Amino acid sequence: MEDISVVTAVHHPLRRRIYDYLLLYGTSQVTALSRALDSQVGSISHHLRMLERAGVVERAADPTGDKRTSWWTATRRGLTWSADDYADSPADALLAREAQRQGIRLQFERLQRWHRRRNDPAYARYDGYSTDSSAWATPEELQDLSTRLLRTMREWESAIDLDDGQERTPVFIFSHAFPTEP
């Protein structure tokens, strides 16, 4: 179970973008983050410190040796949690549900952005996909599914050779599984 401070830190819109950028591009300088995310350096620095307090990012050594610049790196590859993890604390459960709502908004905003840009020549070779299914499961079986999907995503990601000279674009992967009625 993730500490609630981690969940709430990552689900702030700008902090999530910072975290995602660091996951995709690796160790980065504050000014590079500022330019890429179209945000002020001071704002980026503030949000990096919030993510650092939550243990999601950390300061990194400057690869150029110049001690005047601030470099940061992600400390973990992803988060897995459920709002139900915080049922014992009403305050944390409320924060977790709001973070969950924010995460879902972000996921659908990204999906909508993809649909608006899918005919853009930069993405013409990419075909997004949609997968869905319905099944029966106990809470333990649903947790097992989550673990297996995360393991599959990590195996797929680690098998990609980023130094093979092929052109790639960032992709966003999300999956939801939850109780439902037909």
Image: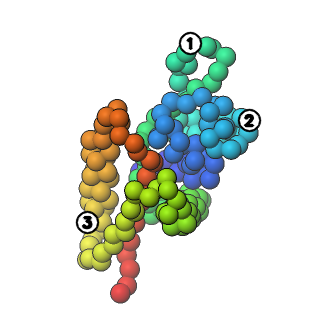
What number is the disc on residue 126? none
Q: Which residue is identified by label 1? A: 65
First reached walking from the N terminus: tag 3 or tag 2:
2
What number is the disc on residue 141? 3
Quadrant in the picture for residue 31: top right
Question: What is the CA distance from the residue labelled 3 to the residue labelled 2?
Answer: 45 Å
Indicate the amino acid at tag 2.
Gly
Q: What quarter of the picture does the C terminus occupy?
A: bottom left
Indicate the amino acid at tag 1.
Gly
Q: Residue 56 placed where, x, y %?
A: 51, 39
Q: Residue 172 placed where, x, y %?
A: 44, 54
Q: Residue at x 52, y 51 (%)?
A: 7
Q: Residue at x 40, y 57 (%)?
A: 126
Of circles 3 and 1, the one toward us is 1
Q: Residue 16 placed where, x, y %?
A: 56, 49
Along the viewing direction, whichever of 90 and 69 lies nearer the viewer: 69
Number of marks in the rendered image: 3
Q: Which residue is identified by label 2? A: 42
Quadrant in the picture for residue 94: bottom right
Say what secondary structure mark 1 lies in.
loop
Vertical placement of 155 versus 68: above or below? below
Question: What is the CA distance from the residue labelled 1 to the residue labelled 2?
Answer: 22 Å
Say what secondary structure mark 2 lies in.
helix
Q: Residue at x 26, y 60 (%)?
A: 144
Q: Residue 49 placed where, x, y %?
A: 63, 35
Q: Residue at x 50, y 56 (%)?
A: 121
Residue 28 appears in the picture as rendered: yes
Vertical placement of 1 versus 65: above or below? below
Mark 1 is surrounded, within 10 Å at the Cα level, by few (under 14), some (14 to 19) or many (20 or more) other residues, namely: few
Along the viewing direction, whichever of 116 and 180 lies nearer the viewer: 116
